[in-house]
Amino acid sequence: MSRIVILIGGHLCNAPRPYKEAEALAKSGHDVTIAGIWFDPNFIERDRLLILNKKWKFEPIVDFQPNNIVNNWMFRFRSRFAREIFRRFGIFSPDLLGYGAKEMLKYAKKAKADLTIVHSEGGLWAGSHLLDKGFRVGVDFEDWFSEDLLTDARADRPIKQLKILENKLINGCSYCLTTSSAMANNLAKAYQSNLPTVIYNTFPWEERTRIDGKVGDRRDPNLPSIHWFSQTIGAGRGLETLFQALPYVCYPIEIHLRGNCPKDYRQKLNQQIPSEWIDRIFIHPTVANNELLSRISEHDIGLALEVSNISSRNLTITNKFFQYLQAGLAIIATDTDGQSEIISDNSQIGKLVLSNDPIALAQAINDMISDPNELRTYKLSSLQAAREIFCWEIEGEKIRQLVKEIL
C-alpha cells in the first residue's frame, strides 16, 4: 500500500478530523503518519494517549514547549518579526501562517510520501511548494482560511496570499475535501474549480460504547441542561446572543460552557450574564478526547450558535454539531448555510433559529423545554440520525474510496 503523510498545524488532540482521516486510511492498509506541532505539555499527554495501539504514527515536526527555551524563543521571535514586517511593509512570510510552516515543508520533502495531505494555513504554503516539486498533494478545507475570523482579527492576516494558495491547491489537488455542500459550492465558485468532496465532521457510532455514565457537569439532575463547547470560549461564537436571550427564557435550566476561557474574556463574559443567571451558568475546562462524549451526553440540548457574518463560520458544519448528534442531544442551531443543510432535511433532530436573534433563541429553548416528550423525541431522533446517516463509518469509507481512486 501507499505511504501517506498528514500535516497539521498543532496538537493531535485538537485535530479530530485528521485523526479520523488517519484511522480510515490505515484501515485500508496504508502507511500513515500525522505530523504536527507540540507546544503545550498537557496537550502532549493527550496526544500520547491518542496514539497508543494505533496502526498509524504521530510525529512532532517541531517541539517548542516552555522548557525548550531555544525552540520556544526562536519560533515566537520569527512569528513576531513576520507580523511586524507584514504590518509595516506588506511583505509576506510563511511564519504569518502559524508556527512551523517551513518545517512542515522540510519534513514532507524528506518523507517523500505517495500522498501528502495538508489541513492548516501553514500546510497550504507547504503544499503549494510540494506541488511545484511534483509531489502528489491533498488538501482539506476544514475552514475557508481566507474568509475566517472577525474583521478586527483580519487586519494583520495575509488575505491575498491565502487566496492565492487556496486557488492553487483547490485546482491542483485531486484529493480535495471540505466540510459541507455549502462550503464546497462556494469554494468552487470562488476559484472556478471542481467541487471538493464533502466529508462531514461526524464521529464513529461505536464510540458510544465508551460513554462512562458518570455525572461530571450537572448540578441538579431535575433541571434541563444545555451544553455548548469549543476549544476557546470567546467572541464571535454566538455566546453574546445566548446571554442576551436569557431574560426571555421562562424555565429554570442549567447552562454549561466548555472550553479554554482567557481571563480577559472571562471578565467580559461575566458582565454580559444577567445577574439572576450567574448561579446557573457553569464553565468547564476542556477534557481529554476519550472523555468528551461522556460529558456531552450528560446534557439535553446542544447549542450550535455559529455566526453568519463570517463566511467560513457560515458555510461549515463544526465538530460540535455532529458530537451533539452522537451524544443524543436535541440541537438548537443558528440558520447558517452549513447547519441549515443538515436540519432543513432532518428537522426531527432540532430547531433552526435566526443568527444573532436572542428572542428567537429564547423561544426555541422555551419550546423544547416546555414539552418533555417533544424534547425526548428530538434526542432519540438525534441518536437515530447519528447511527444511520451522520457517522464516521460512512464518511470514512468516502475517504478510502477517494484515495483508492487517486493512488
Image: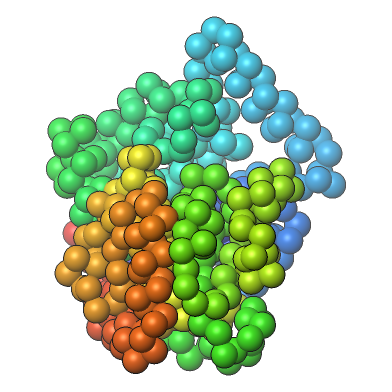
Image quarter where the C terminus lies is bottom left
71 and 379: which one is in front? Answer: 379
Q: Residue at x 76, y 38 (%)?
A: 72
Q: Nearer the viewer, residue 206 or 31?
A: 206
Task: Give the answer, above or below, for where 390 lies relative to 188.
Answer: below
Q: Position of residue 120 (x, y in %)?
A: 46, 43
367 in relation to 171, above or below: below
Give the residue at x 46% y 64%: 248
Q: Is residue 321 visible?
A: no
The quadrant of the image that shows the N terminus is bottom left
Q: Residue 159 location, x and y as percent?
A: 41, 25
Residue visible at 37% across and 40% down?
A: 310
Q: 327 or 367, which lies in front?
A: 367
Nearer to me, 333 or 59: 333
Q: Is residue 402 left or right of residue 179?
A: left
Tell me residue 391's x, y (percent). 32, 76
Q: Is 335 placed above or below 93 here?
A: below
Residue 336 visible from this viewpoint: yes
- Answer with the quarter of the image where residue 312 lies: top left
Which corner quadrant of the image does residue 106 belong to? top right
* Residue at the top extreme, as displayed: 89
